[in-house]
Amino acid sequence: MAIATTGRCTIVGRTIAILAAQKDPPDRVILSIAQPGDADLAGLPPLPFPIKIVSGPKGSCVQRNAVLRAPQPGGIILFLDDDFLIADGYISALRRLFTRHADVVMATGLVLADGIHGPGYTHEQGLAILAQAPQTAPDPQIQEVYSVYGCNMAIRAAPPELFDEALPLYGWLEDMDLSQRMARYGRIVRDDSLVGVHLGTKQGRSAGLLLGYSQIANPVHMIRKGFVSRAPVLKIMIKNILSNLARSLRPEPWIDRRGRLRGNVTALRDLLRGRCTPNRVLELRTTPASVRGNVS
């Protein structure tokens, strides 16, 4: 199991502690961090699995690739967000899936609740949701999907493709991008016996402006590469623009809608000028807020 995290030491520590209390733990956990303070192993209880730490530049794609480039003793790597809680039994179900279906190259699970669409859940709330979840069938049907969901995605070790490091920071839609490139080698599936809850913790997430820019720039980059279908990607782009526009007048307290809308507009303007690339967010990140509206 691998978790890429930065700036959320307390959150990832609580997630690991919950994982350690399960009857069905992973063989080991790899933490991919960007700075020393991203993980505090001294504060953790005794663990039934070893923890390895890899470090490198900040960014979800770069940090996940640091895991994929490291020697892997096992055959499956499960990437979890640092605020994703799996149900006890998830690990055994994942092993069963990849053992029975040799043609599966990537898999994702059933998200019972996703706090990313609201104010988010605490770890205690997530555990309560898992406790109320119905038992899954011993041999559930798997279904092919267009993309895994990045908060919980499993991939066979030593994959022929890596995450696209041209998608910086939050790496918007990096899960879809990798799924479509991996689809050339096998099936991308969802298995509903892989159950979990995404807390959707807001701490440490990308600023609204930067995420809004990535909501346009990253899909454009993916379309240019030619691996994703235009229709689903354009649908996501349009949905995000309309949502940010409609809710910017009365934004949710937990979402910077106006910042995201500014990011959308900036990216569309850059697209018309022929300079819209995912890495542009790195320039915007260092631009003072007082002059961001005039960035050219």
Image (cartoon, rainbow, N blue to C red):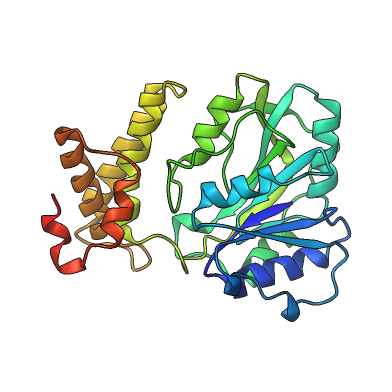
**Left or right: 75, with 155 as reference point:** right
Residue 132 appearing in the image? no
Q: Residue 14, position in %: x, y?
A: 68, 72
The location of residue 279, given as percent across then percent down, is 34, 46
Please state if 281 lies on the left or on the right of 144 as rendered: left
Q: Quadrant of residue 256?
A: bottom left
Please give the name of the residue rendered at 38% of the width and 66% of the height, measured from the top-left corner.
Answer: 254
Residue 138, picture quadrant: top right
Please tell me which residue lies in front, 295 or 261.
295
- Front-most of residues 95 and 141: 95
Residue occupying image coordinates x 75% and y 70%: 17
Left or right: residue 178 compared with residue 42: left
| Position in image of residue 243 (x %, y %) | 29, 47
Side of 47 relative to 276 (left or right)? right
Q: Is residue 56 above or below residue 65?
A: below
Residue 50 shows in the view: yes
For residue 12, which quarter of the picture? bottom right
Where 285 falls versus 14 (above or below)? Answer: above
* Residue 212 against residue 49 in the figure, above or below: above
Q: Residue at x 83, y 50 (%)?
A: 89
Give the total number of marks visible in the rendering: 0
From the top left corner, tell me how far across and down residue 160 is, in percent: 65, 28
